[in-house]
């Protein structure tokens, strides 16, 4: 017996419906607690919890006669499914995220009476929590990571200080610190009682470095290095008058706050005026520090031979000291008080860079001597720190974001260029391949269904080589419709309203008693504008026990119905009564053996296809045998209906015209749209593809946890 005869011979019997249940029905119970959520469906059969997976066969009645009637109450069964480790972990995480919401409150206020509905709500909240966490991670990368790698510093360059010098805002610098003197200028009482400083005089400090106005004596700054015999009257100050030509230009303008400058002033009598009076007074006006760019420091050090030196990222202006120790008036080494080993380091004539940190650490001196010299330099010659704001560490996040932006822009550009491949191409001649056009329907209105059917019938393709296969998912009346969806489809195709074929049983993609479903098969020819196209309609009407949404099992069930049918045709497997009825009408009424169909075109019931679309898809698959699935461009048909549809135009252009065109350059598309795609049922050498057993079984998963 050949495969064709075997398939025809199976029409007289069905599988999965020939035995009657001999076991009493057991109903599963699921409580809205964490224990039941993790444990899954539980049964008290034989007095114990049975969490071991035991897939019981659907002991259903009928099938041989085709009516599919079942004895009410005897067709329900329980499937105890072993809960996977991943599912348990997900449930624990879900409850950890939503423990604060009692199930009783969800039931009372949220109108979620069923435990599975409450669990679904908790899972959605957990998913939102994950999304929110990822948002925070992204914000951390954009903002927080930069602050960790390069903490915010309140620093200014001298150029910044110079530019902040107006009546509304005025800054000045002094010994490496920046002060906002805007309010200080406006205060009264500066100076002594006989010589008050006016605001216009104080405003001269704005935008400048005021070191020349607040000199520090060497003995006061370095008591451990400058002895009383070297400077008994606290007169040594840097820069030394006459020793250096690089004198601060503001020195002759500012009032010089030197010790003994005004004996009438109690403050100026103090030799520690800077630390005792200036710093405490100006501390509340301090804004930050002065920074210097390393490139500028190296230029001054190497090209200008100026002693701008860096030690541990601190900047010291040592030129006044070099000028003083080289001064002809430096008799008896009066101005030489720093360690001689360090002075030798200063006299290397611009060798290397301005950063002498390693040389400083490499000097052959003890820690105490090094610290004493450092403290002295810190008080006398410190002018700020190195500006790290332009370092790789501080600019890393900026570089990273720019790199990400460039990659995204490059991808968008490449996608746009890839979309240009959808230009005007020559229209291919229609290949003589048999194609079945599957249209799943649910609650679409009459206008949408009519447009879809007419567009499929009007395809520029050989009429007898295409079959309209419409599956109505349930005997349901959609919102705004006056008739049920099956009735709308049948009336559109011109089926006699009096014709009522017998119902046929089949196993649906559902759980428990809902696995049993009944469908009715209609077939005929549809005449549209000179096209006479064969059609078949499968109306899932449900069992007599179903009162609400009878027959409805979902779109996946409608797709599996046809995939499973062709799988059984290919492998000569036993069929359910509904599949046998489909085989019979396709083989004997439509007149095309099911094995002849090579492609499956899946179109939604609200999609209108272009006349040449099927020819182009089949031609592409015929020209490249490696293609297992293919899709075309999809666009909105009501883009001007509302603001939402207008925005969806952009979404469709990105996802279809750009993304899929870009992916196709690499020979594969990650996701084909369910509204308009075509798949190859089997390869040219007869190997099953879409109808292969692993694909059908994986897509037929019954137990969907979420």
Image: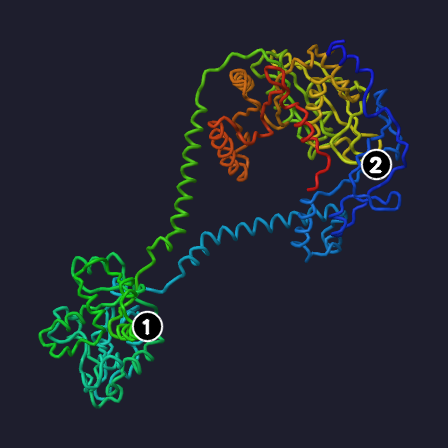
Asked if marks 2 and 1 touch (Cβ < 8 Å), the reply is no
Q: Residue at image x 18%, y 80%?
A: 236
287 vs 256, left or right, is: right
- Residue 680 in the image: above or below residue 248: above
Image: 340 above or below 459: below
Q: Residues within 10 Å of mark 1 (few under 14, many from 20)?
A: few
Q: Position of residue 386 (x, y in %)?
A: 30, 62
- Of residue 307 and residue 700, the one placed in the foreground of this image is 307
> Which residue is found at the position 77% from the left and 12% from the top?
6
Q: Residues within 10 Å of mark 2 (few under 14, many from 20)?
A: many
From the viewer's perspective, is residue 56 above or below residue 377? Answer: above
> Can see residue 172?
no
Left or right relative to 479: residue 20: right
Q: Nearer the viewer, mark 2 or mark 1?
A: 1
The residue positioned farthest toward the left in the image shown: 328
Q: Quadrant of residue 15?
A: top right
Q: Is residue 5 above or below residue 126?
A: above
Q: In terms of secondary structure, where does tag 1 sit?
A: helix
Q: Quadrant of the C terminus?
A: top right
**Residue at the spot of label 1:** 367
Query: Where in the figure is residue 273, as x and y percent of width and height?
Result: 27, 83
User: For mark 2, what is the residue?
Assistant: 77
Name, please, the residue furthest toward the bottom.
264
Alpha-carbon distance for marks 2 and 1? Answer: 86 Å
* x then y, percent, for residue 495: 73, 18
């Amino acid at each position: 017996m050949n495969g064709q005869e075997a398939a025809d011979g199976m029409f007289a019997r069905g599988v999965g419906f020939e035995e009657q249940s001999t076991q009493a029905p057991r109903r599963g119970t699921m409580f809205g607690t964490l224990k039941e959520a993790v444990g899954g469906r539980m049964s008290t059969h034989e007095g114990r919890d049975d969490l071991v997976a035991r897939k019981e066969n659907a002991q259903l009645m009928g099938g041989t006669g085709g009516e599919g009637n079942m004895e009410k109450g005897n067709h329900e069964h329980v499937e105890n499914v072993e809960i996977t480790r991943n599912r348990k972990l997900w449930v624990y995480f879900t409850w950890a995220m939503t423990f604060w919401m009692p199930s009783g409150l969800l039931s009372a206020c949220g109108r979620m009476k069923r435990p599975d509905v409450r669990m679904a709500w908790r899972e959605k909240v957990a998913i939102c929590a994950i999304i929110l966490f990822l948002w925070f991670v992204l914000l951390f990368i954009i903002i927080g990571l930069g602050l960790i790698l390069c903490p915010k510093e309140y620093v200014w360059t001298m150029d910044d200080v110079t530019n902040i010098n107006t009546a509304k805002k005025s800054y000045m610098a002094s010994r490496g610190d920046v002060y906002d003197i805007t309010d200080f200028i406006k205060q009264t009482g500066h100076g002594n009682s006989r010589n008050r400083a006016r605001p216009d005089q104080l405003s001269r400090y704005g935008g400048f470095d005021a070191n020349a106005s607040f000199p520090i004596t060497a003995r006061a700054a370095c008591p451990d290095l400058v002895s009383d015999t070297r400077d008994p009257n606290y007169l040594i100050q840097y820069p030394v008058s006459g020793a250096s030509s690089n004198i601060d230009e503001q020195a002759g303008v500012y009032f010089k706050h030197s010790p003994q400058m005004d004996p009438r002033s109690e403050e100026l009598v103090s030799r520690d005026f800077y630390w005792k009076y200036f710093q405490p007074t100006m501390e509340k006006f301090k804004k930050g520090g002065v920074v210097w760019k390393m490139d500028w420091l190296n230029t001054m050090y190497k090209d200008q031979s100026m002693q701008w030196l860096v030690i541990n990222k601190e900047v010291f202006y040592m030129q006044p000291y070099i000028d003083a120790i080289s001064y002809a008036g430096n008799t008896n080494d009066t101005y030489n008080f720093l360690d001689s080993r360090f002075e030798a380091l200063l006299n290397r004539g611009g060798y290397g860079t301005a950063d002498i940190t390693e040389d400083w650490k490499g000097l052959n001196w003890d820690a105490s001597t090094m610290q004493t010299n450092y403290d002295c330099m810190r008080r006398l010659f410190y002018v700020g720190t190195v500006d790290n704001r332009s370092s790789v560490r501080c600019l890393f996040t900026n570089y990273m974001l720019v790199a990400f932006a460039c990659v995204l822009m490059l991808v968008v550009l490449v996608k746009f260029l890839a979309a240009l491949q959808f230009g005007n191409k020559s229209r291919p001649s229609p290949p003589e391949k048999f194609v079945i056009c599957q249209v799943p329907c649910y609650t679409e209105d009459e206008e949408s269904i009519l447009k879809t059917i007419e567009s499929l019938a009007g395809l520029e393709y050989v009429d007898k080589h295409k079959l309209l296969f419409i599956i109505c998912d349930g005997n349901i009346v959609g919102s705004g419709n006056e008739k049920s969806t099956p009735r709308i489809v049948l009336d559109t195709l011109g089926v006699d309203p009096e014709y009522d074929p017998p119902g046929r049983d089949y196993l649906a993609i559902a759980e428990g008693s809902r696995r049993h479903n009944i469908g009715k098969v209609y077939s005929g020819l549809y005449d549209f504008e000179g096209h006479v196209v064969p059609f078949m309609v499968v109306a899932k009407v449900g069992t007599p026990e179903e009162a609400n949404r009878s027959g409805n099992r979902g779109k996946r069930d409608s797709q599996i119905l046809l995939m499973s049918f062709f799988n059984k045709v290919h492998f000569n497997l036993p069929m359910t009564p509904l599949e046998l009825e489909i085989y019979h009408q396709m083989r004997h009424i439509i007149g095309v053996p099911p094995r002849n169909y090579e492609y499956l075109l899946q179109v939604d019931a609200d999609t209108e296809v272009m006349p040449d679309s099927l020819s182009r898809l089949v031609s592409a698959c015929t020209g490249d045998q490696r293609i297992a699935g293919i899709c075309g461009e999809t666009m909105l048909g009501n883009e001007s209906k509302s603001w939402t549809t207008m925005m969806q135009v952009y979404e469709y252009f990105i996802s279809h015209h750009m993304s899929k065109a870009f992916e196709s350059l690499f020979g594969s598309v990650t996701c084909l749209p369910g509204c308009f795609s075509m798949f190859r049922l089997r390869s040219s050498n007869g190997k099953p593809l879409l109808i292969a057993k692993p694909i059908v079984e994986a897509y037929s998963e019954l137990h969907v946890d979420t």
